[in-house]
Amino acid sequence: MSWPVAEDTLQALGAEIAAAVGAGAEASTAYGELTLAIPAGRIVEVLILLRDRFGFQQLTELTGVDHPDRALRFDVVYQLLSFTRNLRMRVRVQTDEDTAVASVTGVYPCANWFERECFDMYGVFFSGHPDLRRILTDYGFHGHPLRKDFPMSGYVELRYDDELKRVVYEPVKSVEYRNWDFLSPWEGAQYVLPGDEKGEAR
């Protein structure tokens, strides 16, 4: 856990970092945290600069954020920690569904699994990654679960088939046609419930 840092100190550090990064860098502070927005093509060089010159030795998290109404719909967010400054900051880049972001596994080796998770959940590609494949979902899984346009119930569901003696995948039935009967079969109501399509008492 890092200690709270004064807003003017964060703004000064942000201005120093943005000046060192140069063109395209934009530093901002909100809720006591420093954010650096940069072009996606410069992520590797900027993270090397932050690690070697500004002392952000640890990548603690890498995740995506989906904004489906934007042309560059994904933010890839890198959360960094400086042990020497006792300070956290984030670096943010934007990309779309087809443009790969350079892998930072050469800068922070722990990014390997983080990037695989971001690829699996959001469909963001990372060029130069040593083993970019799914890590949380099944190998035959279709889609990316944390995208805003992914259906809540998914596309397929699985169950164990006793006759086949294995797990089988089936298309998800539409939610409108499912029977959402929450009454216990042992303790059902003794009267007709409002809106009950069955129209008879239990």
Image (cartoon, grey):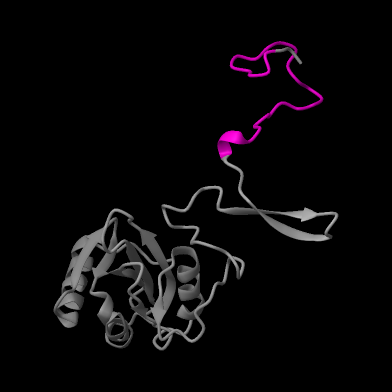
For image coordinates 85% across by 55% down, the residue present is 163
Where is 195 relative to 61, above or below? above
Place of residue 106 in the rendered image (x, y in percent of width and height, measured from the top left): 41, 89
State yes or no: residue 178 in magenta.
yes
Quarter of the view holding residue 39: bottom left
Q: Nearer the viewer, residue 186 or 70?
A: 70
Place of residue 53 in the rendered image (x, y in percent of width and height, measured from the top left): 27, 86
Place of residue 41 in the rendered image (x, y in percent of width and height, measured from the top left): 26, 80
For image coordinates 60% across by 14% down, the residue present is 194
Q: Nearer the viewer, residue 73 or 107?
A: 73
Where is 25 relative to 44, above or below? above
Q: Nearer the viewer, residue 174 or 93?
A: 174
Magenta stretch prevailing secondary structure: loop
Is 191 left or right of 115, judged from the image as shown?
right
State yes or no: residue 96 in magenta.
no
Q: Which residues are magenta?
A: 175-199
